[in-house]
Image: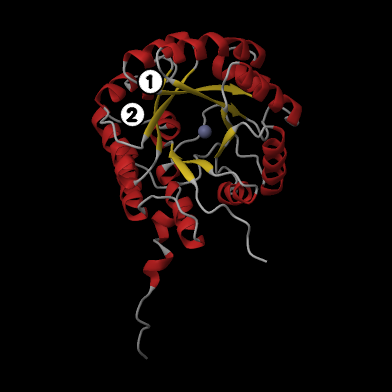
């Protein structure tokens, strides 16, 4: 029986935001633009280019406004950014950002650490933020971090996640990302949750966001693909790792995911060689080794070698 995967996936390169915001070394605006525009040229349809939080809280993203002002628009490419409050929405509108992502943690403890608010307070804040963003001509999506588990909660009940989905839908947000920030998801759980959520909310456009903390990122993506989910976040060279999460690792690496899709006959529209060049470039910029198998070992297709003669 064949694997029942989707034929095509839409990948969002989140390295410029989720990756870089957790790196000690802060990249220059020019270096960020090189990566973001490079990703667009490599075929990424969606790129998360930054976030509009306080520069004191996230100094790595302090120049997101400048990044958006200078970003060359490209047909068919969506540049999105994270915002957490009205101030962030105003900054986004002022620099020409067209797509915002709001976030709330399904874990009360994590949400307090990240946003200094309870999930309920954050949910109450969705309305003015999404209203202001739409009034400024921006599209709005939402994400739910710790959707699959949290280091601070014994479990995250599906009903908690559904409450947040309902809150997003109430304010007209239909594009929603389920995020495994702490890398606790497993493939069986992903398949079951995705199947249930897709059946419960046929109107939602789903994204999945996996951190590779326990090496399950690729397996979780495969499980999501089997459940019919087609949108995934990935990160060049697997950079990143949330500072609040114990032992955190970055997102599942872009090169590994594009390679798996290519080998499995799943269309991504992304040029793997160019993605690998960008991954290598990012490794040089951040100054530490990649968390990407394909960057280390090369592509399977490149392994055709002459056998040594005896
Ligand atoms: Zn993340």
Residue 246: x percent and y percent? Answer: 59, 33
Residue at the location (40% across, 43% down)? 236
Closer to the N terminus: mark 1 or mark 2? 2
Residue 254, above or below 207: below
Residue 175: image quadrant is top right
Q: Are marks 1 and 2 in contact (CB under 8 Å)?
A: yes
Q: Which residue is farthest front?
A: 203
Considering the image in quadrants, where does the N terminus appear? bottom right
Residue 107: in sight, yes or no?
no
Mark carried by residue 73: none
Answer yes or no: disc 2 within 8 Å of ligand 1: no
Q: Which residue is drawn at the image coordinates 23% and 31% (left, top)?
A: 30
Disc 1 to disc 2, C-alpha distance: 8 Å
Q: Give the answer, above or below, for where 203 lies relative to 41.
A: above
Give the x, y percent position of residue 17.
41, 30
Nearest the eye: 230 or 92 = 230
159 relative position to 194: left or right: right
The residue singled out by tag 1 in the image is 59
> How packed is label 1: few (under 14 Cα within 10 Å), some, or many (20 or more)?
some
Secondary element under disc 2, as helix, strand or loop, is loop
Locate the C terminus and report the quarter of the image it occupies. bottom left
For disc 2, the marked residue is 26
Q: Residue at x 65, y 18 (%)?
A: 167
Instruction: Please rate how many residues cluster around mark 2, counting C-alpha atoms within 10 Å: few if below 14, some from 14 to 19, many from 20.
Output: some
Relative to the observer, which residue lies in front, 11 or 278? 11
Residue 68 relative to residue 225: left or right = left
Q: Position of residue 164 (x, y in %)?
A: 66, 22
Helix, strand or loop at disc 1? helix
Rendered image quadrant of residue 38: top left
Looking at the picture, does residue 276 appear above or below residue 139? below
Residue 106: x and y in percent read 66, 25
* Residue 300 seen in this snapshot: yes
């Amino acid at each position: 029986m064949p694997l029942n995967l989707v034929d095509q996936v839409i990948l969002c390169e989140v390295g410029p935001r989720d990756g870089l915001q957790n790196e000690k070394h802060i990249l220059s605006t020019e270096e960020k633009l090189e990566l973001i525009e490079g990703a667009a040229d490599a075929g990424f349809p969606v790129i998360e280019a930054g976030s509009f939080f306080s520069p004191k809280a996230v100094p790595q993203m302090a120049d997101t406004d400048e990044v958006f002002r200078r970003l060359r628009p490209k047909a068919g490419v969506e540049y999105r950014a994270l915002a957490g409050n009205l101030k962030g929405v105003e900054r986004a509108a002022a620099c020409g950002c067209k797509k915002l992502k709001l976030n709330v943690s399904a874990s009360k403890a994590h949400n307090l650490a990240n946003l200094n608010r309870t999930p309920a307070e954050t949910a109450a804040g969705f309305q003015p933020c999404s209203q202001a963003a739409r009034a400024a001509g921006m599209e709005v999506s939402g994400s739910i971090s710790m959707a699959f588990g949290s280091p601070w909660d014994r479990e995250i009940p599906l009903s908690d996640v559904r409450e947040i989905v309902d809150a997003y839908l109430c304010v007209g947000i239909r594009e929603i990302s389920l995020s495994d920030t702490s890398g606790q998801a497993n493939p069986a759980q992903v398949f079951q949750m995705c199947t249930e959520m897709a059946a419960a909310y046929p109107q939602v456009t789903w994204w999945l966001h996996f951190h590779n903390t326990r090496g399950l990122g690729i397996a979780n993506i495969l499980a999501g693909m089997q459940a019919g989910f087609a949108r995934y976040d990935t990160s060049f060279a697997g950079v990143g790792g949330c500072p609040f999460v114990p032992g955190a690792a970055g997102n599942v690496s872009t090169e590994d995911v594009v390679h798996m899709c290519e080998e499995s006959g799943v269309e991504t529209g992304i040029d793997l060689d160019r993605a690998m060049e960008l991954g290598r470039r990012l490794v040089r910029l951040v100054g530490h080794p990649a968390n990407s198998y394909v960057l280390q070992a090369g592509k399977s297709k490149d392994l055709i070698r002459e056998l040594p003669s005896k």
